[in-house]
Image: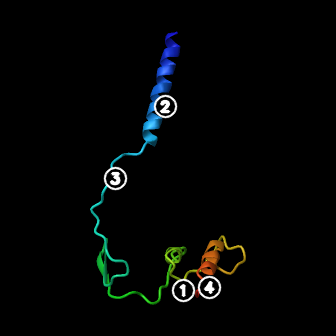
Amino acid sequence: MRASRLIALGISVALTGSLAACSSSTDGGTTDTESTETGAFPVTIEHAYGETVIEQKPERVATVAWSNHEVPLALGVVPVGMSKATWGDDDGDGVLPWVEDKLEELGAETPVL
């Protein structure tokens, strides 16, 4: 009898912990980040080597490493040049299928590889 009570207690504790982990907090949570106006230039980017100032909106974007082009494409920016895919490319044109889909969605031609 004692063993069954211990098992029941263990199951109760486990279920209570599981349900508590799934609950959401009532605190809305605030952040101390400053909001900036979208598209405002110049933009200063702080990084490990100091900071870089981008004076005006870039007109042409090129990516230099495999899959780096996926970031600007996700933001709706089509690079003028990108690296060629060397694996996972079913038709051998150097562009992965999901990249082809995104280029088509954006109405763009394949950039220089």
**Residue 41 point in image, percent of width and height:** 32, 84
Which of labels 1 and 2 is toward the front?
A: 2
Distance of mark 4 from mark 1, alpha carbons?
9 Å
| Residue corresponding to mark 1 | 81
For residue 52, which quarter of the picture? bottom left
Q: Amino acid at mark 1?
A: Gly
In the depicted view, which residue is nearer to us: 52 or 18?
18
In terms of secondary structure, where does tag 4 sit?
A: loop
Instruction: State left or right for residue 53 relative to residue 1.
Output: left
Q: Quadrant of residue 39?
A: bottom left
Question: Could you tell which of marks 3 and 4 lies nearer the N-terminus?
Answer: 3
Residue 34 placement, left or right of 113: left
Per the model, the C-alpha gap separating discs 2 and 4 is 53 Å
Judge the density around disc 4: few (<14), some (14-19), many (≥20) Cα neighbours within 10 Å. some
Q: Residue furthest top?
A: 1
Q: Nearer the viewer, mark 2 or mark 4?
A: 2
What residue do we see at 54% from left, 86% from top? Answer: 81
Q: Which residue is mark 2?
A: 15
Q: CA distance from mark 3 to mark 4?
A: 44 Å
The kind of residue on which mark 3 rests is Gly
Q: Mark 4–mark 1 contact, CB under 8 Å?
A: no
CB-based contact (under 8 Å), mark 3 and mark 4 = no
Q: Which residue is mark 3?
A: 28
For marks 3 and 2 on the same chain, the one whose residue lies earlier in the sequence: 2
Q: In the image shown, does 28 or 102 lie closer to the viewer?
A: 28
At mark 3, the secondary structure is loop
